[in-house]
Amino acid sequence: MRTWWMVLIVLTLILGACAPAATPTPTPPPAPAASPTPLPPSPTPVPKVLVVARAKMDIRTLDPHRQYEIAPPQIMRAAYETLVTLGDKGANITEIEPLLAESYEISPDARVYTFKLRKGIKFHTGNEMTAEDVVFSFRRLGNLKDNPAWLFSDHVESIEAVDPYTVRITLKEPNAAFLAMLVSPNFAVVDSKAVKEKGGTDAPDADKTDRATDWLNQNSAGTGPFILKEWKEKEHVILERNPNYWRTPPAIDRIVIRDIPDPTAQLQALERGEVDIAQSLDVDLINRLRASGKAQIIEGYTLDMIYLAITMNPEISKELADKRVRQAIMHAIDYEGIIKDLMRGAAVHLPTVIPLGLIGTDPNLAPKRDLEKARALMKEAGYEKGFKVKMVFPTATFVGGLPAETLATKLQADLAEIGITLELEPRETVAWRADYRGGKLAITIADWTPDFLDPHGWAIPFAVKGASAAKRVYYENPKAEELAIRAGQITDVEERAKMYLELQGLFLEDATYIGLIQPKVYIATAPNVKGVVYNPVYFMDYLYVEK
């Protein structure tokens, strides 16, 4: 029994040791941390592309020291900069303020101009701008001897880098208008190192040895807010935002200027949203847009002008050589009819040959039609019964879209009312211009396009005996000549303005040049485009345009 009992106990212990242990209630694992909601990938910024339409872009080159046509200046302004610029973002054409220059000084005799340059401005290449770049740029402009070379070579006696950030320019003679001349894109400052690497030179024989133009036609070497990327002739120009621009960066990433010859096609592209700015719409299309309310219209005045030129030479026309006859013609013209009917309001009456908007101009100077006065002057001169005279005019269309023939026909009708019979003779423009410049024409209509924004650019050619315009009509008035020369030699703006007003009084008295029209410019933009400001130097500054 005892043995059995002992066996039973041992067996029980053995079986208990081999039995599985009781499984404890498991503790639930901690809840996994909530996974953060994945953020959507950052969207790639959509480039802001500004598409501009312009008709028949007359680009011969995009070399800033060679270009001299109508379309390139706005492109030059985007890629290059000058020492000085127009005030109020280009809207104020009588105020000049520093740009690449930090400050400037003009000697009392208006002959020495000294510029202090801003430091730290970089070219598109990354090279820093210094005085040596300015000297190279200006000398290259003159020594290339291309169309705009006279802006430098006719006026500058010497230019020097006084130190890395100071430039001194000494003129051949006093010229208070030189500062205004420097606004021209032809005075663009280029990266001398980059241009030299591409074969450029400012040497006296640059007209024969410079090889940089081909490169500059497809690339830019300036400090401007945009970089030239491509020019395809008669197709487009592409500029891209300069990421390292020294002022507030532009709001536009890319500019595409398309050559769209047909104004109606431009209008339709604007209405469809394919272009943002249309630069070549005539007044009828502009009025259509105004009525639709689908676009904004920016309006400005050119400094182009169309005038009537009458000889003072009795050997060409004894009748027209009489000042009273010329004054009669001035009072016989229906200026209001020309503006309203022929130009459909897209122009203003130009008082003389110095365009409105410049210092020393006043729209109230403009003569008005007075047939009674005109007839009285004809009678006083002994031509009460009238006379015949040939008017040769160009077979051209003037700025603003006015055909010369249409204007000539209107003048013919106006002068017939005081007994003057104009025998109209259209002449091919090149031949007409040669005869006009040669002083062979008795009476004609002509146009004038500005080279820079200062009355000096008109006063000297028209008032100085033997100057370009004066010799065409044999104009001679010693007092007018003295005023024109003196006004260009003093720096006091108010005094200059008074002198130009007095000069225009003499022009009106002599009635050799009779101002007719100063055309307007219209720019149409999409409703979401802002910052477009027209000016007659570089047309518009893309730095300030937003979309």
Image (spheres, helix red, strand yellow):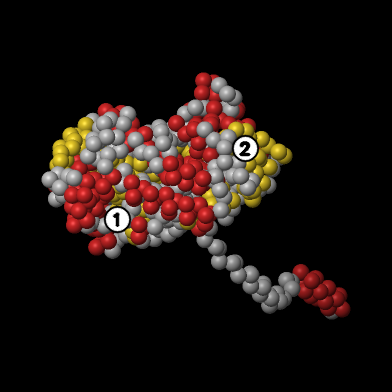
Residue at x 31% of width, y 43% of height: 512
Please state which of residues 408 and 137 is positioned toward the viewer in this rendering: 408
- Residues under labels 1 and 2: Cα distance? 41 Å
Q: List x then y, in percent, for residue 205.
A: 55, 21
Task: Tell me where residue 361 sits by quadrant.
Answer: bottom left
Please state which of residues 431 and 235 is positioned toward the viewer in this rendering: 431
Q: List x then y, in percent, for residue 413.
A: 14, 47
Is residue 536 visible from the viewing direction of this image?
A: yes
Instruction: Tell me the residue that label 2 is attached to.
Output: 170
Mark 1 and 2 residues: CB-CB less than 8 Å, in contact? no
Q: Earlier in the sequence, mark 1 or mark 2?
A: 2
Q: Is residue 210 left or right of residue 474?
A: right
Q: Is residue 349 left or right of residue 28?
A: left
Residue at x 17% of width, y 45% of height: 383
Q: Which mark is residue 367?
A: 1
Q: List x then y, in percent, for residue 225.
A: 53, 47
Residue at x 73% of width, y 71% of height: 20
State which quarter of the image contains the C terminus: bottom left
Mark 2: amino acid:
Thr
Please state which of residues 357 and 471 is positioned toward the viewer in this rendering: 471
Q: Give the crowd class for mark 2: few <14, some 14-19, many >=20 residues within 10 Å.
A: some
Is residue 344 visible from the viewing direction of this image?
A: no
Q: Which mark is residue 48?
A: none
Classify mark 2: helix, strand or loop: strand
Please state which of residues 238 and 456 is positioned toward the viewer in this rendering: 456
